[in-house]
Image (spheres, rainbow, N blue to C red):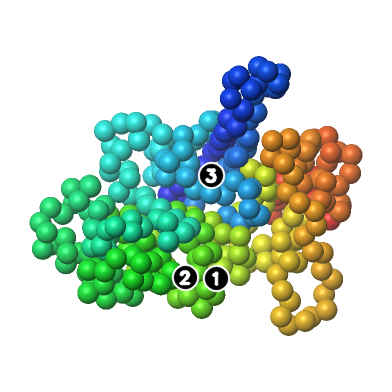
């Protein structure tokens, strides 16, 4: 098993307390949000792990932790068997950053509107000192733009002259500039039309095949996940509740939350199968429920679920954090 990325018991808490004087006057304690609460997974080289879940479950925070934009409160991220936090604090930081890049969610916000495309895509090359000659730089930018389905002449345009899908292609070209091994894709198609989504996803799959890329793909769209992923991790309130190969997740979901997410997908074939729509709201992360955080919305919850937090257990090659599954009740 050739593992490129390994995450071990990753934790990230954010201090969201009111200012000190307000806390003193109103006699309020400090408040912490557990955005990521003990997440573990691994990604094999050349494969795609998709993280799915409702908004606010911690997917994007995991993405930022993996590329070093946030420092973990606890736990470790290993890239190529090296601890990312230690490497980023050493002289090898620049070499590590070249090997991993991120594609952000909003192509309208992640590109500098005052720069031309050749400056945007060429910036990683100049920042890392990979190309210093201007003619070579422009030639490389032209190659990168062609690899994502744009023309070389587009490098003289500004971001506002492109559609959303074209802007996201520019973002992908920028991410590929340093020839990384690992791309973290934070909902890269959620701001795009459905037809454009398919084009961008196909480009990403072609690039993965040709360059041997490894992806962490963040999404809340299960149709997209089905198209791009090899493994799927389902997150709820900062924790991974189910982790399994794509075929298993879609054919035989184990966790009640995964079942609810899949039941929310429109049944175009109108098969008439029983469906349980996603009920209730995600609890306030400032005061999460006791025990299993999903128990207020779960039709299979009992007293143990309300009192004891389930561990992520391996079950026939699938990892599930659910008392009902472990006890054979579902």
Mark 2 near mark 1, Cβ–Cβ under 8 Å? yes
Name the outermost residue toward the right: 303
Gap in angstroms between the C-alphas marked 2 and 3: 22 Å
Mark sitting on residue 277: none
Q: Which residue is mark 1?
A: 227
Q: Secondary structure at mark 2?
A: helix
Residue 16: horizontal and vertical position, in percent?
A: 60, 32
Residue 67: horizontal and vertical position, in percent?
A: 42, 45
Gap in angstroms between the C-alphas marked 2 and 1: 8 Å
Please count the marks in the image.
Answer: 3
Q: Which residue is mark 2?
A: 201
Identity of the residue drawn at 35% across and 67% down: 160
Q: Is residue 260 above or below residue 205?
A: above
Residue 318: horizontal and vertical position, in percent?
A: 66, 54
* Quarter holding residue 203: bottom left
Can residue 27 be seen here?
Answer: yes
Local crowd size for mark 3, using a 10 Å CA cut-off: few (<14), some (14–19), many (≥20): some
Q: Which residue is mark 3?
A: 61
* Quarter holding residue 268: bottom right
Instruction: Specify which label sits upstream in the sequence, 2 or 3.
Output: 3
Q: Is residue 278 above or below residue 27?
A: below
Q: Nearer the viewer, residue 141 or 216?
A: 141
Q: Nearer the viewer, residue 91 or 40?
A: 91
Quadrant in which the C terminus appears: bottom right
Q: Secondary structure at mark 3?
A: helix
């Amino acid at each position: 098993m050739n593992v490129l990325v390994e995450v071990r018991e990753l934790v990230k808490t954010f201090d969201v307390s009111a200012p000190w004087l307000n806390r003193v006057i109103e006699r309020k304690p400090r408040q912490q949000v557990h955005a990521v609460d003990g997440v573990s997974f691994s990604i094999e080289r050349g494969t795609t792990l998709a993280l799915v879940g409702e908004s606010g479950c911690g997917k994007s925070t995991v993405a930022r932790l993996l590329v070093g934009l946030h420092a973990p409160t606890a736990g470790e991220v290993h890239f190529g068997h090296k601890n990312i936090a230690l490497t980023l604090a050493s002289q090898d930081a620049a070499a590590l950053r070249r090997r991993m890049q991120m594609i952000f969610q909003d192509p309208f916000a992640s590109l500098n509107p005052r720069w031309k495309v050749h400056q945007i895509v060429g910036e990683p090359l100049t920042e890392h000192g990979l190309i210093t000659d201007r003619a070579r730089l422009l030639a490389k930018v032209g190659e990168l733009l062609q690899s994502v389905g744009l023309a070389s002449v587009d490098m003289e345009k500004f971001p506002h002259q492109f559609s959303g899908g074209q802007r996201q292609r520019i973002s992908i070209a920028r991410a590929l500039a340093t020839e990384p091994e690992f791309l973290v894709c934070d909902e890269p198609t959620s701001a795009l039309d459905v037809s454009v989504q398919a084009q961008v996803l196909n480009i990403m799959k072609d690039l993965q095949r040709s360059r041997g890329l490894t992806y962490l793909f963040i999404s809340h769209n299960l149709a997209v996940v089905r198209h791009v992923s090899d493994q799927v991790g389902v997150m709820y309130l900062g924790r991974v509740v189910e982790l399994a190969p794509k075929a298993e997740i879609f054919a035989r979901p184990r966790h009640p939350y995964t079942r609810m997410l899949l039941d929310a997908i429109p049944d175009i074939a109108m098969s008439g199968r029983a469906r349980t729509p996603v009920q209730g709201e995600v609890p306030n992360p400032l005061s999460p429920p006791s025990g299993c955080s999903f128990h207020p919305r779960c039709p299979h919850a009992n007293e143990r679920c309300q009192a004891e937090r389930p561990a992520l257990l391996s079950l026939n090659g699938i990892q599930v954090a659910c008392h009902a599954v472990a006890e054979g009740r579902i």
